[in-house]
Amino acid sequence: MERVFIIPLRKVKNVPRTVRAPRAIRYIKEFIKKHMKADEIKIDASLNEKIWERGIQKIPPKIKVKATKEEDGTIAVTLVE
C-alpha cells in the first residue's frame, strides 16, 4: 500500500531554534504512525537530508513524502521529487 502525504511542519517552528530539525523528524514519524496505523517507521536518507539541508534551525515549511507499507508491517517513508 502506498500513500502520498504533504506534511505541514509549521507547528515545529514554534520550538527553540536549536531543536527544530530533530523535532521535525519526530513529527514526521508521529504523523505517519497516526495516518498509516503502524509501529515501526523507517525514514529514508533523502528525506533526512532534505530536513537537514539548511541546518538545524531552518527547516522547510512543508514536505511531500511517500509512505509504503511493506508486508511485515513496517513503513518506509521516502521523499517525493
Image (spheres, rainbow, N blue to C red):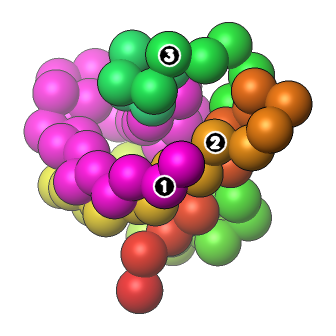
Residue 79 screen position, x and y as percent: 50, 69
Q: Is residue 35 left or right of residue 39?
A: left
Disc 3: which residue: 37
In the picture, which quadrant includes the C terminus?
Answer: bottom left
6 versus 70 height, above or below = below
Disc 2: which residue: 69
Q: In the image, what residue type sits under mark 1? A: Glu
- Determine crowd level at label 1: few under 14, some 14-19, many 20+ residues with C-alpha closer than 10 A: few
**Label 3 to label 1: alpha-carbon separation:** 13 Å
Asked if residue 63 shows in the view, the reply is yes
Determine contact: label 1, label 2, CB under 8 Å.
Answer: yes
Circle 3 SS class = loop
Q: In the image, what residue type sits under mark 2? A: Lys
Disc 1: which residue: 2
Residue at 85%, 31% in the rendered image: 72
- Occupied quadrant, residue 47: bottom right
Circle 1 SS class = strand
